Image (spheres, rainbow, N blue to C red):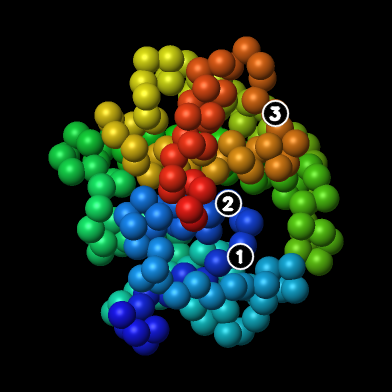
């Protein structure tokens, strides 16, 4: 597949949402079918006219599809990848699976990933003053408590479940895995008593898609 016919992923190395897409591609065995384009967020490349032209929200990741369209939002990108490439489904194959995966994916995103992000960007130095142009520490610390409540929710859920949704690995697992990684980076530890969540994270860390991505 020539570079002209490849899909392209605009990403920032080390950021949690681009990492979600790399893990999805790795699970599908499709990393070599994608062109990766680094966006230098720390030097405000995501706030240039050129980048706003492909994503008016100025966030990574962004996917340039085979059709030449641009997709942002990690869930939408994962949907496209899952439909485009062969390999195990990440979004479900039956109506019930799809519903369960989307429900739990959204919970992992809102209760963990998004809550951690709000804490990081509002209650810590975040990415620095050039990027963090507005901060509300009270809101950020409230979201830290929301993230900790999310940890407890998933700890209880994983007591009787190997995966976050349905009976197979899915995008919901990817979201929770990187939500927890982001939490660790932001200084939010998983309480020691949440042994189901800690054990699940250790098991997931051994999955090839999380090391190959």
Numbered mark located on residue 141 in the image: none
Give the mark nearer the N terminus: 3 vs 2.
2
Residue under label 1, please give it: 12
SS class, disc 2: helix
Relative to 35, is 73 above or below? above
Residue under label 3, please give it: 189
Residue under label 2, please give it: 16
Q: Between residues 9 and 118, which one lies in front from this camera angle?
A: 9
Residue at x 47% of width, y 43% of height: 175
Q: Between residues 81 and 59, which one lies in front from this camera angle?
A: 81
| Count of marks placed on residues | 3
**Residue 138: % across, % down:** 78, 37
SS class, disc 1: loop
- Left or right: residue 123 versus residue 39 is right
**Residue 152: % across, % down:** 55, 20
* Label 1 neighbour load within 10 Å: few <14, some 14-19, many 20+: many
* Label 2 neighbour load within 10 Å: few <14, some 14-19, many 20+: many
Residue at x 62% of width, y 29% of height: 146
Whole-number angstrom distance, CA of label 3 to CA of label 2: 17 Å
Residue at x 47% of width, y 16% of height: 156
SS class, disc 3: loop
Whole-number angstrom distance, CA of label 1 to CA of label 3: 24 Å
Give the mark nearer the N terminus: 1 vs 3.
1
Q: Quadrant of the N terminus?
A: bottom left
């Amino acid at each position: 597949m020539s570079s002209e016919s490849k899909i392209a992923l605009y990403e920032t190395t080390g950021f949690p949402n681009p990492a979600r897409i790399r893990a999805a591609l790795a699970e599908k065995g499709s990393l070599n079918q994608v062109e990766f384009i680094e966006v230098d967020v720390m030097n405000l490349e995501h706030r240039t006219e050129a980048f706003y032209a492909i994503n008016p929200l100025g966030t990574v990741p962004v996917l340039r599809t085979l059709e030449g369209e641009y997709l942002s939002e990690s869930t939408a990108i994962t949907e496209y990848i899952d439909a485009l490439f062969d390999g195990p489904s990440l979004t479900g194959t039956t109506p019930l699976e799809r519903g369960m995966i989307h429900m739990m994916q959204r919970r992992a995103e809102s209760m963990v990933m998004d809550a951690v992000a709000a804490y990081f960007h509002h209650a810590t130095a975040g990415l620095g003053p050039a990027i963090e142009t507005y901060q509300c520490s009270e809101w950020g610390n409230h979201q830290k408590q929301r993230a900790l409540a999310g940890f407890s929710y998933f700890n209880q859920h994983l007591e009787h479940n190997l995966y976050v949704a349905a009976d197979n690995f899915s995008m919901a697992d990817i979201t929770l895995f990187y939500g927890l990684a982001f939490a660790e980076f932001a200084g939010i530890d998983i309480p020691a008593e949440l042994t189901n969540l800690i054990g699940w994270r250790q098991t997931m860390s051994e999955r090839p898609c999380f090391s190959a991505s």
